[in-house]
Structures are given as structure tokens and as C-alpha cells.
Amino acid sequence: MTRITARPLTREAFAEFGDVIDMGGDNHYPINGGKAERYHDLATAEAAGPNARVLISMVRGTPYELPLKLTMVERHPFGSQAFIPLSPRPFLVVVCHDGKEGPGEPHAFITAPGQGINYPRNLWHGVLTPLGEAQDFLIVDRGGDGSNLEEFHFSHAYEIHLP
């Protein structure tokens, strides 16, 4: 089994895999008469294919045992997929670049409390992995005709550890 240690999620470290969704960055401004601060254009929602539309959903995720035994990743050929936590708890993010015959070696990140992520179309990623206790998330992804899910099962497991 190959051991991988998760590293902190930052915009710079995650840029090659997708978007970090949080209240950081320079693109923010006051709205509603100065009573709210809008953090603008944090991620791009993609929806391609027949009858495509952007969906907004919610999910309650159950934590996995750690270290995580990663045996499968998935990707979505027709649309992006964003996970935004509804509580200030961290979660584990696993992503892979394309390899010659499927996904390459996984990279693991641990979010800071309140950070979300957006995977672009066709990025291999692990399943939603809350840490410690059940956690609720807002999901923005693609609906429409055609299958928007492809799974890949590794020939050997990866063992993901927290720092």
C-alpha cells in the first residue's frame, strides 16, 4: 500500500486541480448598504452535454475511518462539482491528474475550517470525506441527460494519512 500524507489546502497548492472556495482573495466588496461583504466569482460551475443545467443540492456526509484506504476515484465528464461545507469543520480532499491508463498518483489535502472546493470537469477525485463527525455540504454540480459519472478502481490501495 502506498502512503500519502494530506497537506493543507491553499489556493496555490490546489490551483492545478480546481478552485478553493472560501472568503479569501482580493475579489470582494461591500453590498446591501455595507451590511454584507460579497466574495465574488470564487469558482466556475460547468454544465455541458444534452439538456445540461446547474444543480444546487445538499448532502450529509459520514466520516470515514483514518487512515483512509483509497481504492477508487471518480470524475464527471459533463460538469464541475463543488462541495461547500455548511459548518466550520475541515474535510479531506483527494485528487489525481490523468495518467496513461487512468488516474495518476493521488494528492491529498485537508481543508481549513470553512473552505470548500470546486472540481472542474474530468478531474479524478475521491469521494466526499468529512473528518471526525457527520457534516453537511452544499453541492453545485451538473444535471441533465447522459451519464456524468466515471469510476476508476486502483489495482492497489493508497493509504491517506493526516499530517
Image (cartoon, helix red, strand yellow):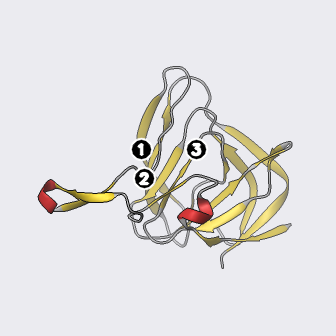
| Residue 85 left/right relative to 148 | left
| Residue 34 left/right relative to 56 | left
| Residue 85 left/right relative to 12 | left
Front residue (pair 37, 157):
37
Q: Secondary structure at mark 1?
A: strand
Q: Residue furthest bottom?
A: 163
Tell me if I can see residue 92 in this picture: no
Q: Which amino acid type is marked by label 3? A: Pro
Residue 148, picture quadrant: top right
Q: Secondary structure at mark 2?
A: loop
Tell which circle, 1 or 3, labels the residue nearer the N-terminal end: 1
Q: Residue furthest left?
A: 33
User: Residue at point 64% right, 34% down?
Assistant: 77
Q: Residues within 10 Å of mark 3 (few under 14, many from 20)?
A: many
* Residue 124, x across and y down, in percent: 69, 47
* Residue 117, x across and y down, in percent: 51, 56
> Mark 1 — residue?
57
User: Residue at point 67% right, 72% down?
Assistant: 66
> Mark 3 — residue?
120
Residue 87, picture quadrant: bottom left
Q: How many angstroms separate mark 3 from mark 2 (CA)?
A: 13 Å
Quadrant for the N terminus in the image: bottom right
* Residue 10, x across and y down, in percent: 55, 67
Residue 128, picture quadrant: bottom right
**158 up-or-down from 145: above or below:** below
Q: How many angstroms separate mark 2 from mark 1 (CA)?
A: 18 Å
**100 up-or-down from 126: above or below:** above
Q: Residue furthest top?
A: 50
> Mark 2 — residue?
42
> Between tags 2 and 1, which lies in front?
2
